[in-house]
Image (spheres, grey):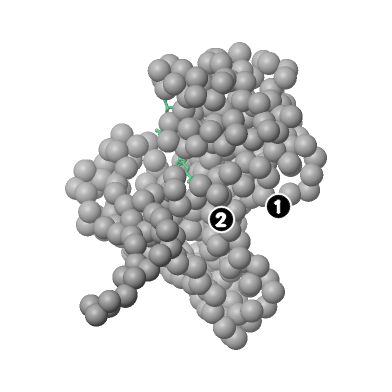
Amino acid sequence: MTTLAVFGAGRIGTIHAGNLAANPDADVRYVVDVDEPSASRLAASCGAGVASKDDALNDKDVTAVVIATSTDTHTDLIKSAAAAGKAIFCEKPIDLNIGTAREGVNTAEQHGVQLTIGFNRRHDPSFQKIKDEIDAGTVGSVEHVSITSRDPSPPPAEYVARSGGIFRDMMIHDFDMARWLLGEEPVVVFASGSVLVDESIGEAGDIDSAVALLKTASGSLCTISNSRRCSYGYDQRIEVFGSSGMVSAGNKTATEVGTADSSGFHSEVALPFFVERYADAYRIQLDKFLRAVNGEQVDLPGAADGLRALMLADCAQESLDTGAPVAVRE
Ligand SMILES: NC(=O)c1ccc[n+]([C@@H]2O[C@H](COP(=O)([O-])OP(=O)(O)OC[C@H]3O[C@@H](n4cnc5c(N)ncnc54)[C@H](O)[C@@H]3O)[C@@H](O)[C@H]2O)c1
Protein backbone atom coordinates (compact mmCIF):
# COMPACT_ATOMS: atom_id res chain seq x y z
CA MET A 1 0.00 0.00 0.00
CA THR A 2 1.40 3.40 -1.02
CA THR A 3 0.38 6.47 0.95
CA LEU A 4 0.13 9.60 -1.18
CA ALA A 5 -0.61 13.30 -1.18
CA VAL A 6 -2.36 14.83 -4.19
CA PHE A 7 -1.43 18.43 -4.97
CA GLY A 8 -4.06 20.26 -7.01
CA ALA A 9 -7.81 19.71 -6.79
CA GLY A 10 -8.74 21.05 -10.20
CA ARG A 11 -9.75 19.22 -13.38
CA ILE A 12 -6.95 16.67 -13.55
CA GLY A 13 -6.27 16.41 -9.80
CA THR A 14 -9.88 15.29 -9.39
CA ILE A 15 -9.36 12.48 -11.93
CA HIS A 16 -6.11 11.34 -10.32
CA ALA A 17 -7.45 11.41 -6.77
CA GLY A 18 -10.53 9.46 -7.88
CA ASN A 19 -8.39 6.80 -9.56
CA LEU A 20 -6.13 6.50 -6.54
CA ALA A 21 -9.10 6.28 -4.17
CA ALA A 22 -10.41 3.36 -6.24
CA ASN A 23 -7.04 1.61 -6.27
CA PRO A 24 -6.60 -0.97 -3.47
CA ASP A 25 -2.82 -0.34 -3.52
CA ALA A 26 -3.15 3.39 -2.80
CA ASP A 27 -4.09 5.45 0.23
CA VAL A 28 -4.73 9.12 -0.53
CA ARG A 29 -3.94 10.69 2.82
CA TYR A 30 -3.99 14.38 1.86
CA VAL A 31 -5.28 16.75 -0.78
CA VAL A 32 -3.35 20.03 -0.97
CA ASP A 33 -4.69 23.04 -2.83
CA VAL A 34 -4.31 26.79 -2.31
CA ASP A 35 -8.05 27.00 -2.89
CA GLU A 36 -9.44 25.57 0.35
CA PRO A 37 -12.99 24.79 -0.90
CA SER A 38 -11.54 22.80 -3.82
CA ALA A 39 -9.24 20.87 -1.50
CA SER A 40 -12.07 20.12 0.96
CA ARG A 41 -14.46 18.98 -1.77
CA LEU A 42 -11.96 16.60 -3.32
CA ALA A 43 -10.63 15.34 0.02
CA ALA A 44 -14.18 14.52 1.14
CA SER A 45 -14.87 12.63 -2.08
CA CYS A 46 -11.87 10.36 -1.67
CA GLY A 47 -11.70 9.91 2.09
CA ALA A 48 -8.59 12.06 2.52
CA GLY A 49 -7.71 14.97 4.75
CA VAL A 50 -6.79 18.51 3.73
CA ALA A 51 -3.24 19.59 4.52
CA SER A 52 -0.75 22.35 3.81
CA LYS A 53 2.15 21.55 1.50
CA ASP A 54 4.59 21.32 4.44
CA ASP A 55 2.34 19.14 6.59
CA ALA A 56 1.78 16.71 3.72
CA LEU A 57 5.48 16.51 2.88
CA ASN A 58 6.53 16.18 6.53
CA ASP A 59 4.37 13.09 7.01
CA LYS A 60 6.83 10.18 6.86
CA ASP A 61 4.04 7.75 5.85
CA VAL A 62 3.58 9.68 2.61
CA THR A 63 6.00 8.10 0.17
CA ALA A 64 4.66 9.49 -3.11
CA VAL A 65 3.02 12.64 -4.40
CA VAL A 66 0.90 13.51 -7.41
CA ILE A 67 1.48 17.06 -8.67
CA ALA A 68 -1.61 18.24 -10.54
CA THR A 69 -1.44 21.96 -9.81
CA SER A 70 -1.16 24.81 -12.32
CA THR A 71 1.93 24.33 -14.48
CA ASP A 72 3.82 27.34 -13.09
CA THR A 73 3.91 25.71 -9.64
CA HIS A 74 5.29 22.30 -10.70
CA THR A 75 9.02 22.91 -10.26
CA ASP A 76 8.66 24.38 -6.80
CA LEU A 77 6.63 21.34 -5.73
CA ILE A 78 9.02 18.90 -7.44
CA LYS A 79 11.94 20.44 -5.52
CA SER A 80 10.12 20.32 -2.18
CA ALA A 81 8.83 16.78 -2.69
CA ALA A 82 12.27 15.57 -3.83
CA ALA A 83 13.96 17.13 -0.81
CA ALA A 84 11.43 15.26 1.35
CA GLY A 85 12.35 12.01 -0.42
CA LYS A 86 8.98 11.39 -2.07
CA ALA A 87 8.45 9.60 -5.39
CA ILE A 88 6.85 12.09 -7.77
CA PHE A 89 4.20 11.86 -10.45
CA CYS A 90 4.01 15.29 -12.11
CA GLU A 91 1.56 16.46 -14.73
CA LYS A 92 2.79 17.76 -18.06
CA PRO A 93 4.51 20.05 -18.81
CA ILE A 94 7.24 19.94 -16.15
CA ASP A 95 7.37 23.73 -16.20
CA LEU A 96 6.74 26.65 -18.53
CA ASN A 97 10.46 27.38 -18.68
CA ILE A 98 12.96 24.71 -19.67
CA GLY A 99 15.75 26.13 -17.49
CA THR A 100 13.50 26.01 -14.45
CA ALA A 101 12.30 22.54 -15.43
CA ARG A 102 15.93 21.34 -15.54
CA GLU A 103 16.45 22.67 -11.99
CA GLY A 104 13.53 20.55 -10.78
CA VAL A 105 14.80 17.48 -12.63
CA ASN A 106 18.30 18.00 -11.20
CA THR A 107 16.90 18.25 -7.67
CA ALA A 108 14.96 15.01 -8.16
CA GLU A 109 18.15 13.31 -9.44
CA GLN A 110 20.22 14.63 -6.52
CA HIS A 111 17.76 13.16 -4.06
CA GLY A 112 17.45 9.93 -6.03
CA VAL A 113 13.65 10.07 -6.25
CA GLN A 114 11.56 8.78 -9.09
CA LEU A 115 10.06 11.46 -11.34
CA THR A 116 7.29 10.34 -13.70
CA ILE A 117 5.63 12.73 -16.14
CA GLY A 118 1.90 12.56 -16.92
CA PHE A 119 2.06 11.83 -20.64
CA ASN A 120 -1.13 9.79 -20.32
CA ARG A 121 -1.55 9.13 -24.04
CA ARG A 122 1.28 6.58 -23.96
CA HIS A 123 -0.97 4.50 -21.71
CA ASP A 124 -4.06 4.68 -23.92
CA PRO A 125 -4.79 1.09 -25.05
CA SER A 126 -5.35 2.12 -28.72
CA PHE A 127 -2.15 4.14 -28.96
CA GLN A 128 -0.23 1.42 -27.08
CA LYS A 129 -1.48 -1.01 -29.75
CA ILE A 130 -0.15 1.31 -32.49
CA LYS A 131 3.23 1.31 -30.74
CA ASP A 132 3.15 -2.49 -30.43
CA GLU A 133 2.38 -2.83 -34.17
CA ILE A 134 5.29 -0.53 -35.05
CA ASP A 135 7.63 -2.50 -32.77
CA ALA A 136 6.39 -5.77 -34.32
CA GLY A 137 7.38 -4.46 -37.79
CA THR A 138 3.82 -4.31 -39.18
CA VAL A 139 4.37 -0.98 -40.97
CA GLY A 140 8.06 -1.51 -41.79
CA SER A 141 10.18 1.56 -41.19
CA VAL A 142 8.15 4.53 -40.00
CA GLU A 143 8.01 7.29 -42.60
CA HIS A 144 5.16 9.58 -41.55
CA VAL A 145 3.28 9.97 -38.29
CA SER A 146 0.09 12.08 -38.47
CA ILE A 147 -1.44 13.27 -35.21
CA THR A 148 -4.76 15.09 -34.93
CA SER A 149 -5.58 16.54 -31.54
CA ARG A 150 -8.49 18.95 -31.19
CA ASP A 151 -10.21 20.08 -28.01
CA PRO A 152 -14.02 20.46 -28.06
CA SER A 153 -13.90 24.04 -26.75
CA PRO A 154 -11.33 26.52 -25.45
CA PRO A 155 -10.26 26.40 -21.80
CA PRO A 156 -11.16 29.30 -19.46
CA ALA A 157 -9.23 32.54 -20.04
CA GLU A 158 -7.55 32.28 -16.64
CA TYR A 159 -6.25 28.79 -17.56
CA VAL A 160 -4.86 30.06 -20.89
CA ALA A 161 -3.09 32.93 -19.13
CA ARG A 162 -1.10 30.46 -16.95
CA SER A 163 -0.77 27.68 -19.53
CA GLY A 164 2.43 28.71 -21.34
CA GLY A 165 0.75 28.73 -24.75
CA ILE A 166 -0.69 26.06 -27.01
CA PHE A 167 2.66 24.37 -27.78
CA ARG A 168 3.70 23.90 -24.13
CA ASP A 169 0.21 23.23 -22.82
CA MET A 170 -1.56 21.23 -25.52
CA MET A 171 0.76 20.15 -28.33
CA ILE A 172 3.27 18.91 -25.75
CA HIS A 173 1.23 15.69 -25.59
CA ASP A 174 1.63 15.32 -29.35
CA PHE A 175 5.37 16.07 -29.22
CA ASP A 176 5.69 13.22 -26.74
CA MET A 177 3.62 10.90 -28.94
CA ALA A 178 5.69 11.92 -31.97
CA ARG A 179 8.98 10.98 -30.25
CA TRP A 180 7.50 7.74 -28.94
CA LEU A 181 6.05 6.62 -32.28
CA LEU A 182 8.87 7.86 -34.54
CA GLY A 183 11.36 6.02 -32.34
CA GLU A 184 13.84 8.73 -33.24
CA GLU A 185 14.38 12.30 -32.04
CA PRO A 186 13.06 15.12 -34.24
CA VAL A 187 15.90 17.44 -35.26
CA VAL A 188 13.87 20.15 -37.02
CA VAL A 189 10.55 21.77 -36.04
CA PHE A 190 8.49 24.01 -38.33
CA ALA A 191 5.30 25.38 -36.77
CA SER A 192 2.61 27.89 -37.56
CA GLY A 193 -0.69 28.93 -36.11
CA SER A 194 -3.53 31.44 -35.93
CA VAL A 195 -6.31 32.75 -33.76
CA LEU A 196 -9.39 31.36 -35.51
CA VAL A 197 -11.57 30.27 -32.62
CA ASP A 198 -11.53 32.68 -29.67
CA GLU A 199 -10.31 36.29 -29.73
CA SER A 200 -9.69 36.26 -25.97
CA ILE A 201 -6.98 33.64 -26.54
CA GLY A 202 -5.30 36.05 -28.97
CA GLU A 203 -5.64 38.86 -26.44
CA ALA A 204 -3.85 36.62 -23.92
CA GLY A 205 -0.96 36.37 -26.42
CA ASP A 206 -1.67 32.81 -27.49
CA ILE A 207 -3.06 31.08 -30.59
CA ASP A 208 -5.89 28.55 -30.74
CA SER A 209 -5.11 26.73 -34.00
CA ALA A 210 -1.67 25.27 -34.65
CA VAL A 211 0.20 22.93 -36.94
CA ALA A 212 3.70 21.53 -36.63
CA LEU A 213 5.98 19.55 -38.90
CA LEU A 214 8.79 17.54 -37.30
CA LYS A 215 11.66 15.86 -39.12
CA THR A 216 14.18 13.35 -37.78
CA ALA A 217 17.81 12.95 -38.84
CA SER A 218 16.90 9.94 -41.01
CA GLY A 219 14.12 11.93 -42.72
CA SER A 220 11.04 10.51 -40.98
CA LEU A 221 8.25 13.06 -40.72
CA CYS A 222 5.49 13.90 -38.28
CA THR A 223 2.64 16.33 -38.79
CA ILE A 224 0.51 17.57 -35.90
CA SER A 225 -2.79 19.45 -36.10
CA ASN A 226 -4.27 21.18 -33.02
CA SER A 227 -7.39 23.24 -32.51
CA ARG A 228 -9.00 24.56 -29.34
CA ARG A 229 -12.45 23.95 -30.87
CA CYS A 230 -14.06 20.96 -32.50
CA SER A 231 -17.79 20.68 -33.25
CA TYR A 232 -17.88 16.84 -33.20
CA GLY A 233 -16.20 16.15 -29.84
CA TYR A 234 -12.63 15.57 -28.69
CA ASP A 235 -10.82 14.66 -31.91
CA GLN A 236 -7.92 12.31 -31.13
CA ARG A 237 -6.57 10.34 -34.09
CA ILE A 238 -3.21 8.94 -35.05
CA GLU A 239 -1.97 7.35 -38.27
CA VAL A 240 1.48 5.86 -38.76
CA PHE A 241 2.53 5.20 -42.34
CA GLY A 242 5.61 3.10 -43.09
CA SER A 243 7.51 1.30 -45.82
CA SER A 244 5.27 -1.76 -45.70
CA GLY A 245 1.98 -0.67 -44.19
CA MET A 246 -0.09 1.69 -42.11
CA VAL A 247 -1.61 1.55 -38.63
CA SER A 248 -4.20 3.99 -37.32
CA ALA A 249 -6.51 4.68 -34.39
CA GLY A 250 -9.70 6.70 -34.78
CA ASN A 251 -11.93 8.47 -32.31
CA LYS A 252 -13.76 6.65 -29.57
CA THR A 253 -17.52 7.10 -29.25
CA ALA A 254 -19.93 6.39 -26.44
CA THR A 255 -21.25 3.07 -27.76
CA GLU A 256 -19.14 2.48 -30.91
CA VAL A 257 -22.43 1.73 -32.71
CA GLY A 258 -22.81 2.98 -36.29
CA THR A 259 -25.93 3.13 -38.44
CA ALA A 260 -26.52 3.26 -42.17
CA ASP A 261 -29.50 4.29 -44.25
CA SER A 262 -30.23 5.67 -47.70
CA SER A 263 -28.53 8.96 -46.80
CA GLY A 264 -25.25 7.30 -45.85
CA PHE A 265 -23.26 5.83 -42.98
CA HIS A 266 -23.54 7.54 -39.61
CA SER A 267 -21.52 7.31 -36.44
CA GLU A 268 -21.70 9.02 -33.08
CA VAL A 269 -19.71 12.13 -32.24
CA ALA A 270 -16.38 11.52 -30.51
CA LEU A 271 -16.30 11.27 -26.72
CA PRO A 272 -16.62 14.79 -25.28
CA PHE A 273 -13.18 15.47 -23.74
CA PHE A 274 -10.05 14.12 -22.08
CA VAL A 275 -11.91 13.04 -18.96
CA GLU A 276 -13.88 10.46 -20.97
CA ARG A 277 -11.46 9.72 -23.82
CA TYR A 278 -8.47 8.97 -21.64
CA ALA A 279 -10.25 7.50 -18.60
CA ASP A 280 -8.45 4.17 -19.07
CA ALA A 281 -5.10 5.83 -19.72
CA TYR A 282 -5.28 7.91 -16.53
CA ARG A 283 -6.07 4.81 -14.48
CA ILE A 284 -3.36 2.72 -16.12
CA GLN A 285 -0.62 5.35 -15.74
CA LEU A 286 -1.18 5.70 -11.98
CA ASP A 287 -1.37 1.94 -11.64
CA LYS A 288 2.04 1.73 -13.31
CA PHE A 289 3.38 4.58 -11.18
CA LEU A 290 2.38 2.76 -7.99
CA ARG A 291 4.03 -0.43 -9.24
CA ALA A 292 7.21 1.52 -10.01
CA VAL A 293 7.14 3.11 -6.55
CA ASN A 294 7.05 -0.41 -5.17
CA GLY A 295 10.19 -1.36 -7.04
CA GLU A 296 8.82 -2.98 -10.20
CA GLN A 297 10.53 -2.22 -13.51
CA VAL A 298 7.81 -0.35 -15.39
CA ASP A 299 7.99 1.58 -18.64
CA LEU A 300 6.97 5.13 -17.74
CA PRO A 301 7.76 8.51 -19.31
CA GLY A 302 10.28 10.25 -17.10
CA ALA A 303 12.17 13.51 -16.66
CA ALA A 304 14.17 13.19 -19.91
CA ASP A 305 10.91 12.73 -21.86
CA GLY A 306 9.40 15.73 -20.13
CA LEU A 307 12.40 17.92 -20.95
CA ARG A 308 12.60 16.74 -24.56
CA ALA A 309 8.93 17.44 -25.23
CA LEU A 310 9.30 20.88 -23.63
CA MET A 311 12.29 21.59 -25.89
CA LEU A 312 10.18 20.70 -28.95
CA ALA A 313 7.46 23.03 -27.67
CA ASP A 314 10.00 25.85 -27.26
CA CYS A 315 11.28 25.24 -30.81
CA ALA A 316 7.71 25.29 -32.14
CA GLN A 317 7.06 28.61 -30.39
CA GLU A 318 10.28 30.02 -31.87
CA SER A 319 9.28 28.77 -35.32
CA LEU A 320 5.87 30.44 -34.97
CA ASP A 321 7.53 33.69 -33.87
CA THR A 322 10.17 33.74 -36.64
CA GLY A 323 8.27 32.03 -39.44
CA ALA A 324 11.26 29.73 -40.04
CA PRO A 325 12.10 26.08 -39.32
CA VAL A 326 14.09 25.66 -36.09
CA ALA A 327 16.89 23.17 -35.50
CA VAL A 328 16.22 21.37 -32.21
CA ARG A 329 18.81 22.33 -29.58
CA GLU A 330 20.45 19.61 -27.51
N1 LIG B 1 -2.53 14.94 -18.77
C1 LIG B 1 -3.66 15.55 -19.07
O1 LIG B 1 -4.47 15.04 -19.84
C2 LIG B 1 -3.97 16.89 -18.45
C3 LIG B 1 -5.26 17.41 -18.55
C4 LIG B 1 -5.51 18.63 -17.95
C5 LIG B 1 -4.50 19.32 -17.29
N2 LIG B 1 -3.25 18.78 -17.23
C6 LIG B 1 -2.17 19.48 -16.52
O2 LIG B 1 -2.48 19.44 -15.13
C7 LIG B 1 -2.16 20.66 -14.49
C8 LIG B 1 -3.43 21.23 -13.85
O3 LIG B 1 -4.38 21.45 -14.86
P1 LIG B 1 -5.94 21.54 -14.52
O4 LIG B 1 -6.63 21.58 -15.81
O5 LIG B 1 -6.32 20.52 -13.52
O6 LIG B 1 -5.98 22.99 -13.85
P2 LIG B 1 -7.05 23.57 -12.83
O7 LIG B 1 -6.90 25.04 -12.93
O8 LIG B 1 -8.38 22.93 -13.03
O9 LIG B 1 -6.51 23.06 -11.39
C9 LIG B 1 -5.31 23.49 -10.86
C10 LIG B 1 -5.47 23.50 -9.34
O10 LIG B 1 -4.17 23.77 -8.76
C11 LIG B 1 -4.38 24.62 -7.64
N3 LIG B 1 -3.13 25.29 -7.33
C12 LIG B 1 -2.52 26.30 -8.01
N4 LIG B 1 -1.34 26.60 -7.43
C13 LIG B 1 -1.19 25.76 -6.38
C14 LIG B 1 -0.18 25.57 -5.40
N5 LIG B 1 0.94 26.31 -5.41
N6 LIG B 1 -0.36 24.62 -4.46
C15 LIG B 1 -1.50 23.86 -4.44
N7 LIG B 1 -2.50 24.00 -5.34
C16 LIG B 1 -2.34 24.93 -6.30
C17 LIG B 1 -5.51 25.54 -8.07
O11 LIG B 1 -6.13 26.17 -6.96
C18 LIG B 1 -6.42 24.56 -8.82
O12 LIG B 1 -7.38 23.98 -7.96
C19 LIG B 1 -1.55 21.55 -15.58
O13 LIG B 1 -0.15 21.44 -15.49
C20 LIG B 1 -2.06 20.95 -16.88
O14 LIG B 1 -1.14 21.13 -17.95
C21 LIG B 1 -2.98 17.58 -17.78
Q: Which residue is mark 2?
A: 124
Quadrant for residue 319, please give it.
bottom left
Seen in the image, is 136 located left or right of residue 319? right
The structure residue drawn at horizontal position 31% and vertical position 34%, both measured from the top left corner, is 158
Residue at 68% across, 45% down: 288
Residue 249's x, y, as percent? 49, 68
Of badges 2 and 1, nearer the viewer stands 2
Q: Is residue 196 above or below residue 108?
A: below
Q: Amino acid at mark 2?
A: Asp
Quarter of the image with the C terminus in it: bottom right
Q: Is residue 187 visible?
A: yes
Mark 2 to mark 1: distance in Å? 14 Å
Above or below, 204 against 225 in this view is above
Q: Label 1 CB, ligand 1: below 8 Å? A: no
Tell me what residue is drawn at x 43 percent, y 16 percent. 36
The circle drawn on residue 299 is 1
Ligand 1 quadrant? Answer: top left
Q: In this image, 17 relative to 160: left or right?
A: right
Reply above or below: 142 against 294: below
Q: Earlier in the sequence, mark 2 or mark 1?
A: 2
- In front here: 315 or 207? 207
Of residues 299 and 111, which is closer to you in this image?
A: 299
Location of residue 109 with respect to 85 vertically, above or below:
below
